[in-house]
């Protein structure tokens, strides 16, 4: 039956299949020419595997029987030996080489070609899938499930368990190739791009792109990402402990044939102008009814929109638009997560429907930030994981100088996949012109926050952390990590940095737990901790801290956690216009006129009208009235040049001004 399926699946141009091994020091096997149907139905997260299309491999080629090993690679680059065992994997000579970029893999092929007088390169994506399937159309070449013998800890984990990456330890496919499902991912030649439904001959993808394709999946990756049809990709200069490569020997001419990705709605018809903001009255109180900014796209739009939409960032554009981004996922620690975007166009009352903003295929994308620097440039910073969790992220930067209509090529600004890289919305530009990006220092709820600083408009970045372990966050204590995750940061008038965060709560003199405040007088090298006067927040909540155009500091946070705060500690006292007080619950804004020492103005974020609203994400439905505002949500904020304050929760957009807060 297996042989019958093999013959049905592939039309051979060569009558005899040869398993002759190359005389090169790298064992090679002959792959016959033929045709096959590439891709899958592309359901859900696998949208990029569709449409299924016929591919003709017009000439036979030779392919590495295994992935390139440490011993083989280090004949070319001996210094790579220093990376053996990084993250606890790939220590031995005969284990697959990892921690190599696309450029490293190409350089190896060039070196080997010159050394042996042959033509070596990386396989194209089509060649790779054709060789992997070896005549099958089952999910894996071994069947509809992947037998346990092929497994290399196929699960999501924050820290790798012991695993051997020794090559050729599992049964080969019908072409004699080992480790096509798992062990390590493998770089391919192509730029990543959408498939075409047309029949293609020896396709190699488009002329340019943002990401290079990888295939096959790796250790510590769920089995579904090891399928024959599964597509992954990486930023070409990226490298980590889950990706290596194998090579092919062929003189087949390269046929550039792939299409570019369609332009997303958030980049369509963007007016390229500036200074469109009209001033609003500084004396007239404004509070506008909250509106959703997460708008489900049409089913036929092609936008990957999932159940969980969360963790926004927002900025203003010079042309008068607002731009918001957030992640969409079915699971937060999964590879399917995408960053979606939407635009509230100048003069419009409703946000555009969601559209794709940024996605490195099959990578976790936790953490996004946006900043308009006020000088014509919008910065986008994002986390990119090697696999599915958000502990070990690299940081990527893109910039736009045309109101977000186009973006620069993604560039790694913190290339190590490590802690302290989970991006938090709220990037600031200091009075020195430096960019400061806040990040969670770890994946835990009490791991504190870090900062990354660029003194050259985003070209280079550094983390001022001295490597010290997490301190004991307490009143009067000091350390090199900010107290609290999801921290908001501002620069004070004296040049110091101040941060407020979630978790790591500090007891005040009365013994009550308060939101922690951290102050640094040396640009983030050291922080001093103290209890603020503000209530702590918890799961599903994130604050906003910013300096208003008018001068005061603004905090937007929550009075309590509706599930975890003891009943007797819930709510805050707010003042009515007649001076009486009432107990209010939910999202509030607070103003400080003395650089964070006190917060005399606190206003519940409601105009008193009764509304039944959907806050999305972890918030869900809630009732808003004169004493109740949104109970939780991940907040992001910006103030536009007309001085209107914009706060996004996980789904809703709030608009008000300083006059409303102070009335």
Image (cartoon, helix red, strand yellow):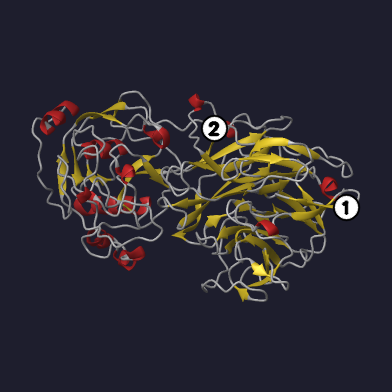
Q: What is the C-alpha distance between the residues marked 1 and 2?
A: 51 Å
What residue would you read off at disc 1? 580
Residue at the image point whose x is 47% and y is 54% from the top: 390
Describe residue 372's horizontal placement relative to residue 5 as left or right. right
Callout 2 crowding tier (Cα within 10 Å): few <14, some 14–19, many ≥20: some
Q: Tell us which disc is closer to us: 1 or 2.
A: 1
Measured as percent of width and height from the top left, residue 67 is found at 24, 51
Label drawn at residue 16 = none
Q: In the rendered structure, are the residues bearing label 1 and label 2 in contact, judged by CB atoms less than 8 Å apart?
A: no
Question: Which residue is painted at 55% across and 29% down in the image?
Answer: 297
| Figure disc tally | 2
Q: Is residue 4 visible?
A: yes
- Of residues 472 and 372, which is closer to you in this image? 472
Q: Is residue 330 above or below residue 585?
A: above
Q: Helix or strand or loop: what does disc 2 sit on?
A: loop
**Mark 1 Cα-neighbour bin, 10 Å: few <14, some 14–19, many ≥20:** few
N-terminal-most mark, 1 or 2? 2
Of all residues shown, which one is farthest toward the front?
568
Q: Position of residue 394 (x, y in %)?
A: 47, 55
- Residue 109: x %, y % from top left: 28, 50
Q: Quadrant of the N terminus?
A: top left
* Residue nearest the observer in this picture, 426 or 380: 426
Would residue 187 be found to the left or right of residue 578 on screen? left
Q: Is residue 596 above or below residue 134?
A: below
Residue at position x 64%, y 54% in the image: 561
The residue to which callout 2 is attached is 264
Q: Quadrant of residue 341?
A: top right
Q: At numbered mark 1, what does the secondary structure look like: helix, strand or loop?
A: loop
Q: Is residue 251 visible?
A: no
């Amino acid at each position: 039956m297996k042989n019958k399926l093999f013959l049905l699946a592939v039309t051979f141009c060569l009558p005899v299949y040869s398993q002759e091994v190359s005389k090169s020091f790298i064992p090679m096997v002959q792959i016959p020419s033929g045709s096959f149907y590439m891709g899958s139905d592309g359901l859900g997260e696998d949208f990029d595997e569709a449409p299924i299309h016929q591919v003709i491999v017009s000439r036979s080629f030779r392919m590495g029987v295994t992935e390139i090993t440490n011993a083989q690679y280090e004949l070319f680059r001996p210094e790579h030996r220093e990376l053996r065992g990084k993250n606890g994997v790939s220590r031995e000579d005969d284990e697959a080489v990892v921690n190599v970029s696309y450029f490293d893999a190409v350089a190896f092929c060039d070196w080997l070609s010159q050394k042996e007088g042959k033509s070596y390169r990386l396989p194209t994506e089509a060649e790779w899938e054709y060789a992997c399937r070896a005549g099958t159309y089952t999910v894996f070449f071994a069947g509809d499930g992947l037998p346990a013998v092929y497994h290399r800890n196929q699960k999501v984990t924050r820290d790798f368990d012991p695993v051997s990456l020794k090559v050729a330890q599992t049964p080969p496919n019908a072409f004699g190739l080992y480790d096509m499902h798992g062990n390590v991912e493998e770089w391919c030649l192509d730029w990543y791009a959408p498939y075409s439904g047309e029949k293609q001959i020896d396709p190699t993808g488009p002329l340019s792109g943002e990401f290079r394709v990888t295939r096959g999946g790796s250790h510590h990756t769920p089995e579904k990402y090891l399928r024959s049809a599964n597509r992954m990709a990486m930023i070409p200069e990226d490298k980590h402990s889950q990706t290596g490569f194998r090579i092919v020997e062929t003189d087949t001419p390269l046929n550039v044939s792939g299409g570019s990705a369609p332009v997303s709605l958030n980049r369509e018809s963007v007016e390229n102008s500036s200074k469109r903001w009209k001033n609003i009255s500084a004396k007239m109180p404004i509070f506008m009814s909250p509106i959703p900014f997460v708008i489900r796209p049409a089913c036929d739009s092609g936008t990957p929109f999932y159940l969980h939409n969360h963790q926004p960032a927002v900025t203003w554009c010079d042309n008068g638009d607002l731009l918001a981004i957030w992640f969409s996922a079915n699971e937060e620690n999964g590879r399917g997560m995408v960053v979606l975007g939407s635009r509230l166009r100048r003069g419009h009352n409703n946000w555009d429907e969601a559209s794709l903003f940024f996605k490195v295929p099959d990578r976790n994308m936790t953490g996004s930030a946006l900043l308009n620097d006020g000088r014509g440039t919008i910065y986008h910073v994002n986390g990119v994981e090697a696999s599915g969790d958000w502990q070990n992220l690299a940081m990527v930067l893109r910039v736009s100088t045309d109101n977000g209509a186009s973006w620069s090529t993604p560039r790694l600004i913190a290339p190590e996949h490590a802690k302290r890289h989970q991006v938090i919305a709220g990037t600031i530009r200091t009075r020195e012109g430096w960019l400061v990006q806040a990040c969670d220092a770890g994946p835990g709820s009490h791991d504190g926050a870090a900062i990354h600083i660029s003194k050259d408009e985003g070209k280079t970045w550094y983390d001022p952390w001295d490597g010290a372990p997490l301190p004991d966050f307490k009143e009067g204590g000091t350390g090199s990590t900010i107290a609290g995750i999801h921290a908001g940061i501002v620069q004070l008038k004296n040049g110091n940095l101040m941060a407020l965060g979630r978790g790591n709560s500090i007891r005040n003199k009365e013994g009550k737990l308060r939101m922690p405040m951290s102050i640094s007088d040396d640009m983030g090298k050291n922080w001093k901790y103290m209890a603020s006067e503000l209530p702590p927040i918890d799961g599903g909540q994130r604050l906003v801290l910013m300096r208003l155009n008018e001068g005061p500091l603004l905090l937007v946070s929550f009075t309590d956690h509706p599930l975890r705060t003891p009943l007797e500690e819930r709510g805050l006292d707010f003042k009515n216009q007649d001076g009486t007080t009432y107990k209010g619950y939910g999202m509030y804004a607070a103003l400080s006129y003395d650089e964070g020492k006190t917060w005399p103005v606190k206003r519940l974020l409601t105009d008193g009208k009764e509304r039944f609203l959907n806050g999305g994400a972890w918030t869900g439905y809630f009732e808003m009235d004169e004493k109740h505002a949104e109970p939780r949500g991940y907040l992001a904020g910006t103030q536009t040049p007309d001085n209107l304050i914009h706060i996004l929760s996980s789904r809703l957009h709030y608009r008000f001004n300083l006059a409303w807060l102070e009335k």
